Amino acid sequence: MAKITASVYTSHVPAIGAAIDHRKTGEAYWQPMFAGYEYSKQWMKENTPDVIFLVYNDHATAFSLDFIPTFAIGTAAEFVPADEGYGPRPVPKVIGHPQLAAHIAQSVIQDDFDLTIVNRMEVDHGLTVPLSLMCGEPDVWPCPVIPFAVNVVQYPVPSGHRCFQLGRAIRKAVESYDADLKVQIWGTGGMSHQLQGARAGLLNREWDNAFVDRLIADPAGLSAMPHIDYVREAGSEGIELVMWLIARGAMSDVDGGPAPTVRHRFYHIPASNTAVGHLILENN
Ligand code: DHB
Ligand code: FE
């Protein structure tokens, strides 16, 4: 039986990827931010899973505004980094896990969540920056990755409640896969940030930290928060945080298992326009 061993939560600010790619991580501006991921990179080496199920959002890169899937699962054998305007990031291509992805699609769709099946897709900073933060700069990523894209860019976006319930369905799907695989689920994006309009530059340290407190201790309650609260308190792009509820919903305590261990927690303001939040939870 496959099982979910841990969940990882992290922001995905594109400037973080640029800082790594242009060798600026030691600069005074960046050093405190990257310092918060030193533990995580070591943890990742010691706890390398067989597969990462990586929940992220595409930023009108692979999916233009021509078609907008709410939830899309990457079932391809590989996914190449996208050119977001400055050439593709110089990071390894992502190797998928078509068998497990197809199994999860089958199980989750039969569990009443409508997923879009994606057999060819380029992946943007939403996916590659979390991998860089957690894995550093390897020649190949340490394991296969199943990309799972969520629409948080064009309204209407899915509710926190739906994301949380989807996480539960993903865990059920993983646990019904007939192979001994250790699977991590990552929820990415956030935390508070607004890139546009009169409130551009908005950050909310207090709200962000209360969000993480609740994500750890009361995820079901947190999942009832309406999307307008995210936008009011964490800015228009703060809505990316609903993706963290997918990963949290896949942890075993949600369905009666023991509470997870908080392995690492980090918060730093700002990186570019964004509050960087990060959390590692291990299943017990
Ligand atoms: C920034 C943050 C994001 O989440 C994003 O997708 C693009 C830009 C920023 O802070 O610059
Ligand atoms: Fe983003």
Image (cartoon, rainbow, N blue to C red):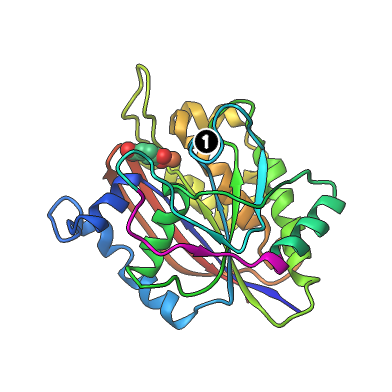
Query: In the rendering, at what x and y percent does residue 272 appear?
Result: 27, 40
Asked if the beta carbon under badge 1 is closer than 8 A to the nearest atom of ligand 2, the reply is no
Q: In this view, does 95 lie to the left or right of 272?
A: right
Residue lying furthest top in this view? 198
Query: In the rendering, at what x and y percent does residue 153 appear?
Result: 53, 32
**Can residue 255 be seen in the rendering of this structure?**
no
Residue at image x 56%, y 37%? 63
Q: Is residue 281 above or below residue 88?
A: below
Q: Is residue 215 left or right of residue 174?
A: left
Within the image, what quadrant is residue 257 found in? bottom right
Residue at image x 71%, y 67%? 100
Q: In which quarter of the image is the N terminus?
A: bottom right
Q: Is residue 95 above or below residue 191?
A: below
Circle 1 — which element? helix
Quadrant containing ligand 1 reads top left
Q: How crowded is mark 1: few (under 14 residues within 10 Å), some or many (20 or more)?
A: many
Residue lying furthest right in this view? 110
Q: Quadrant of the C terminus?
A: bottom right
Q: In this view, does 275 lie to the left or right of 212?
A: left
Magenta range is: 88-100
Residue at image x 26%, y 58%? 20
Please name the amino acid that badge 1 sits on. Answer: Ile
Magenta stretch: helix, strand or loop mostly = loop
Q: In this view, does 31 lie to the left or right of 264?
A: left
- Which residue is identified by label 1? 239
In reply to whether residue 91 is colored magenta, the answer given is yes
Q: Which of 123 and 203 is in front in this view?
A: 123
